[in-house]
């Protein structure tokens, strides 16, 4: 029996970070960053199909008081378009971009904003795995 794969998205208005994980292995890996250019839904569908993903985990943004923001509404609207591709679940993404950038700085290698997005998606997905798959 094959294990289930998860695809995670860190949704932004310019870029979408993507990470993947096999729930059997429970290690989230940054995959790539998609540029928001009108083709992003097709690209996400192709990734979900290639990874045999049944669930898309979407980072859920809130402010530091835990309240919804304009970005929360944007992510909710965008995620509504994903339900034809796979089941969509949300995972809190508080501070994941800050943590992602810190990790990339510590690696000592050059990185771009897109790398932060993919790394943030991996952190969101790792949090989800630890919450729901122990």
Image (cartoon, rainbow, N blue to C red):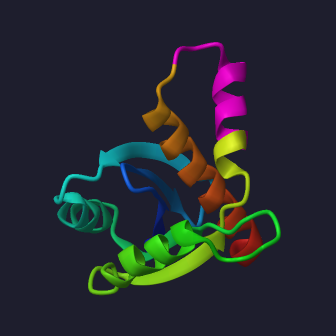
Q: Position of residue 108 (x, y in %)?
A: 65, 13
Q: Which image quarter: residue 65?
A: bottom right
Q: Residue furthest right?
A: 65
Q: Position of residue 47 (x, y in %)?
A: 29, 59
- 43 in magenta: no
Q: Is residue 83 left or right of residue 68?
A: left
Residue under the point 38% across and 44% down = 33
- 103 in magenta: yes
Q: Which image quarter: residue 80?
A: bottom left
Say which quadrant the C terminus sits in: bottom right
Residue under the point 65% across and 77% down = 68
Q: Is residue 53 left or right of residue 96?
A: left
Residue under the point 59% across and 66% down = 24
Q: Is residue 3 visible?
A: no
Q: Residue furthest front?
A: 70
Q: Position of residue 112 (x, y in %)?
A: 47, 26
Residue under the point 49% across and 44% down = 118
| Tally of marks | 0
What secondary structure is the stretch in magenta mostly built from? helix
Q: Is residue 122 left or right of residue 134?
A: left
Q: Is residue 113 visible?
A: yes
Say which quadrant the N terminus sits in: bottom left
Q: Position of residue 109 (x, y in %)?
A: 57, 14
Q: Which residues are magenta?
A: 99-110
Q: Which image quarter: residue 78?
A: bottom left
Above or below residue 25? Residue 55 is: below
């Amino acid at each position: 029996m094959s294990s289930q794969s998860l695809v995670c998205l860190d949704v932004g208005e310019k870029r979408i970070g993507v990470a993947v994980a096999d729930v059997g292995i429970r290690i989230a890996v940054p995959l790539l960053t998609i540029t928001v250019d009108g083709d992003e839904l097709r690209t996400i569908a192709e990734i979900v199909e290639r990874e045999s993903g049944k669930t898309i985990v979407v980072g859920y943004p809130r402010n530091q008081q835990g309240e919804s923001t304009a970005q929360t509404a944007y992510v909710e609207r965008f995620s509504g378009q994903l339900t034809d591709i796979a089941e969509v679940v949300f995972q809190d993404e508080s501070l994941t971009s800050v943590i992602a950038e810190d990790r990339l700085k510590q690696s000592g290698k050059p990185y771009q904003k897109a790398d932060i997005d993919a790394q943030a998606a991996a952190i969101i997905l790792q949090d989800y795995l630890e919450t729901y798959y122990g």
